[in-house]
């Protein structure tokens, strides 16, 4: 029987296989601790976790204060690509590192399928 960590790792690899423009995938808890990851060796997954937690906090505050709603997703665009943070539940989030060439609609569809 597969453990939760094994299932999450399989999910992360599945996202990367389905959408080749996804270069890294990390599941973090709301404190920024990495639950599971599938990232290139040169990527610091702990740094991703901490920054994702900060981004989640800001996103949740903006959603609550300005939209009177819960945050579902927040992303950052740079010349090299995107960092997409998608809430999984109240305690965890999926962080995707995506190339600039990615079709965001396909990424969002894949995230919904996996969620």
Image (cartoon, helix red, strand yellow):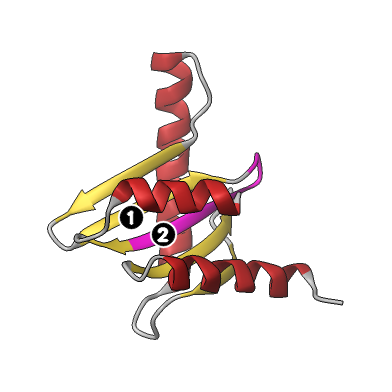
Q: Is residue 20 left or right of residue 1?
A: left
Q: Earlier in the sequence, mark 2 or mark 1?
A: 1
Q: Are marks 2 and 1 in contact (CB under 8 Å)?
A: yes
Tell whether position 96 is magenta. yes
In the rendering, at what x and y percent does residue 96 appear?
41, 59
Mark 2: few/some/many CA within 10 Å (<14, 14-19, 20+)? many
Residue at the image position 27 percent from the left and 53 percent from the top: 103
Q: Residue at x 40, y 44 (%)?
A: 55
Give the Cα distance between marks 2 and 1: 6 Å
- Residue 33 image offset from top left, x and y in percent: 58, 61
Q: Main secondary structure of the magenta part?
A: strand
Q: Is residue 50 above or below residue 18?
A: above
**Residue at 87% in and 77% down:** 1
Nearer the observer, 14 or 67: 14
Span highlighted in magenta in the image: 89-97
Q: Is residue 22 above or below residue 68?
A: below
Numbered tag placed on residue 23 in the rendering? none
Pinpoint residue 108: horizontal percent, then vertical percent.
42, 47
Residue 2 part of the magenta-drawn span: no
Residue occupied by mark 1: 83
| Crowd rating for badge 1 (residues with CA inside 10 Å; few <14, some 14–19, many 20+) | many
Q: Secondary structure at mark 2?
A: strand
- SS class of the residue under badge 1? strand
The residue identified by callout 2 is 96
């Amino acid at each position: 029987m597969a453990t939760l960590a094994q299932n999450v790792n399989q999910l992360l690899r599945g996202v990367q296989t389905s959408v080749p423009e996804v270069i890294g995938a990390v599941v973090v808890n709301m404190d920024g601790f990495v639950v599971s990851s599938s990232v290139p060796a040169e990527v610091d997954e702990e740094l991703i976790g901490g920054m994702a937690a900060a981004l989640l906090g800001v996103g949740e505050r903006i959603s609550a204060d300005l939209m009177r709603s819960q945050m579902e997703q927040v992303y950052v665009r740079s010349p090299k690509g995107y960092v997409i943070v998608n809430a999984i539940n109240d305690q965890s989030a999926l962080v995707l590192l995506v190339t600039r060439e990615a079709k965001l609609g396909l990424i969002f569809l894949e995230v919904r399928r996996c969620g």
